Amino acid sequence: MSLYEECPQKYKFRYIERIPEKPRHFFSFGSSVHSALEFFYGVKTLPAPSLEEVLNYYRQNWISAGYKDKVQEEEYFADGEDILKRFYQKHISDFQIPFFVEYKFDFKINGVPITGRIDRIDKTPDGKLWVTDYKTGKALEKERVLTDGQLTLYQVACEELLGAPVARLSFYHLPTLKEQIVERHSEDIVSDLRKKVTRVADSITQGLFEPLPAEQKCRWCDYKILCPVYQDRGRKNGTPTLKAAPEITQNQQPAEEDLPALVDQYGQLCELIRSNQEEAQQLKKKILELFSKKGFVRAFGKKFEVNLLEEKSWEFSDKKQVLALIKKAGLYERALGPRVERITEILEDEKLPAQLKDELAALAKKTLKKDLKLNSLN
Ligand code: SF4
């Protein structure tokens, strides 16, 4: 619902056309810290897990996706550890097993199916509920807790499904360990939420997915390259167009003299290729690691298969000595130069005298290059 309100076109790309967004480091970071807290509060009986156990869980379940590079990932990892240590020190003395941790709900508002997950629900001494939502972002908007739609939704879900009134709602900002706490949202706020749910559901049913562009939103939107706003803008006013990559391959390039548009399209495609290449390399690395771990040489997806390719190569550290050995053995001509490939060929020759082979091998470092061959199964 919040995505539809942010931009209906973006909602359509994400949930109707099911085009996935790129992984984002801040989502990975939030999930990693959340799951460590779920582990902390998720025990069925006392005592609470030790700090070492919580940190171990955090390390073992760290999500690496979406970080710019190793340095950025390490910085975030350290921030997460620091948050968990401080959180633990602050709360271990008042540790209590919550009523629910990561409570998944599924219900209807005015006939509209709603699903979600609540970080933590506690019971107050008088049997009411206290809903907590953890936040890991850099800053938390002041007084957001007063009217936040997500918390109102949690309140409605709890009261309908758990049969107890909600007494308090809170946002817990983990980086600062500060909490914004309010009493349950008023009936007016709840009524507005119900109306909003109906309105959004009606718009989706009617197929209303008007884009809602805004510089800050669109700058980070993964669908910009597909978004009609940016394609139309280019056609209407001659400003640099931002057409989607597939259209370029369909011979619909801007006019040859439209240099700004060509520059933008070129830059955008280069960015797309670079980011896709980075992702593909990471996936390839993961597959190769799994192949090594499990001893596989072939694996299948639904649409593709991959086969392990192994390429043996030798690196010679002292080329002069190699040359001398080759010449002495009367094989200089055969090595033509001699080039590494030809020396490798000689080295692999079964008829090569064993002593020469050993002497050459002692000067070389053998490496096994691994790659994957990708085939479409269609
Ligand atoms: S680029 Fe902007 S207008 Fe287009 S889908 Fe994304 S957020 Fe919406």
Image (spheres, rainbow, N blue to C red):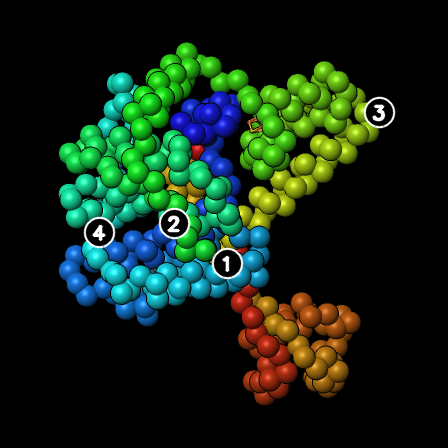
Is 343 situated above or below 236?
A: below
Q: CA distance from mark 4 to mark 3?
A: 66 Å
Counting residues from the start of the chain, the first of labels 3 and 1 encountered is: 1
Q: Position of residue 195 (x, y in %)?
A: 35, 18
In which of the image's four quarters is ligand 1 placed?
Answer: top right
Rounded to the nearest angstrom, the CA distance separating label 1 from label 2 is 22 Å
- Disc 3 or 2, which lies upstream in sequence? 2
SS under mark 1: helix
Q: Residues within 10 Å of mark 3 (few under 14, many from 20)?
A: few
Question: Which dot, 1 or 2, sits closer to the camera?
Answer: 2
Residue 230 sits above or below residue 171 on the image: above
Q: Is residue 320 left or right of residue 171?
A: right
Label 1 is placed on what type of residue? Tyr
Image point (72%, 16%), residue name:
236
Q: Nearer the viewer, residue 176 or 282?
A: 176
Earlier in the chain: of badge 1 and badge 2, it is 1
Q: Amino acid at mark 2?
A: Glu
Q: 217 left or right of 8?
A: right
Percent position (x, y) of residue 102? 28, 46
Q: Does residue 244 appear in the picture of this structure? A: yes
In the displayed structure image, the side of residue 305 where residue 102 appears, left or right: left
Q: Amino acid at mark 4?
A: Pro
Where residue 81 appears, as percent x and y from the top left, is 43, 63
x and y percentages locating residue 89 in the rendered image: 35, 66
Q: Amino acid at mark 3?
A: Glu
Residue at 60% in and 45% down: 275
Instruction: Give above or below for 339 relative to 94.
Output: below
> Which residue is identified by label 3?
257
In primary-sequence order, the first of circles 4 and 3 is 4
> CB under 8 Å between callouts 2 and 4?
no
